[in-house]
Image (tube, grey):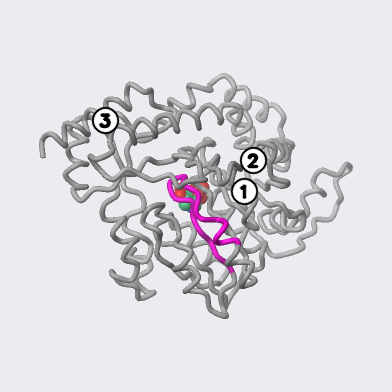
Amino acid sequence: MIPVYDRRKLYLDDKDAIDAAVARVLASGRYDWGEEVPAFEAELAAWLGVRHFVATGSGTAALKAALRALRIGPGEEVITVANTDMANSTAIHSVGARVVWVDIDPLTRCMDPAACAAAITPRTAAILPVDLYGHPCDIRAFRQLADRHGLALIEDACLALGAEVDGQLIGRLADITCFSFSSGKHLGAMGNAGGCATQDADIAERLRLVSGDGQDRARHHRQPRPLDLRHEEESHNDRMDEIQAAILRAKLPSLDRTLAQRRAQAARYTEALAGLVETPAEQPGTRHAWRNYVIETEDRAALARHLAAQGVQCNALYNPPMHLQPVYARLGHQRGNLPRTEASADRLLGLPIGPHLQMAEIETVIAAMRRWNGAR
Ligand SMILES: Cc1ncc(COP(=O)(O)O)c(C=O)c1O
């Protein structure tokens, strides 16, 4: 089977560096509040070209911290999309705000700026677009909207580490850009990890506070350690573990190479599959990070069955969209509320992509896709 993910293969590819990183942390005896997290934050900030990076325990924790750091709260609305992980909705609800889902641009499958503008009310506090599958959202349009209406802008780049807009890596245009480093992401930990990029030192300080038990992190590094434990703000323990930070540091040097692999695989798919199915777009002025290669077709179920029979695994993220999930039935949404989101969710299918695959395996997937077309 050609798998969508193969985390064990990725571990084996970097085994020596990862084993050494884990052994270093274990031998240090510092599993918490150590030096690995600050070192990872500095290294990732340098890679992204941002002023500050604050590590968290997951992408969900990064979104929660971002909303709390920007003081979004009860009675306020946050505009986001429904074709995404549940993390966006849970993070918004966790601060007591209301989720407002709006429709997408069918080309990029990211939030439609016009739909967002139409949903702004006096209660709107923030805009939270998602860089779906690694394609950057129209962040310049959202920046303008946010500035015009005095709103916070949080970019969910959990699927988009390495995406670019106008020749620059994403991470600078939103007030806070959130990333996930869970094990199947561009830069994957051995478990959960995430973090927030920001250009603003005060926001970075608040992110540390609200993701770290409301404690000032610098106090933990002071010697001798102060005897009192001060909590400045009621907060969760949403920090990254030392061991995950050490693993991410070990894998960071491979990130440029694995991004290039993803881009080469996506380019080959697009060249070979054009005309056969709807291939994903890459808008001019942007560079896709290709966390997922998601095609659209009317015959999704038949194609998925055919591919499975040919030894090719595929997936269908995010389907159904959040507004139609059983958990949110209480919010009273129904089919037809977000027609472009729903149409995409009904047709999408993710093909295997990523550094666990060789180009020969991409060719095998392409051959299986061609056989399906021939059989129709
Ligand atoms: C778009 C998006 N946002 C947020 C998250 C949540 O990240 P995590 O699983 O690290 O909590 C994910 C997870 O895949 C995601 O795809």
Q: In the rendering, at what x and y percent does residue 306 appear?
A: 17, 37
Quote the CA–CA distance across marks 2 and 1. 7 Å
- Identify which residue is drawn at 20% across, 32% down: 370
Is residue 56 on the magenta stretch? no
What residue type is disc 1 on? Gly
Q: Which residue is mark 3?
A: 366
What residue type is disc 2 on? Leu
- Height in image: 244 above or below 57? above
3 or 1: tag closer to the N-terminus: 1
Q: In the rendering, at what x and y percent does residue 114 appear?
A: 46, 67
Whether residue 50 sits left or right of residue 314 in the image: it is right
Whether residue 280 sits left or right of residue 41 in the image: it is left
3 or 2: tag closer to the N-terminus: 2
2 or 1: tag closer to the N-terminus: 2
Q: Which residue is mark 2?
A: 48
Region rendered in magenta: 126-143
- Identify which residue is drawn at 10% across, 40% down: 376
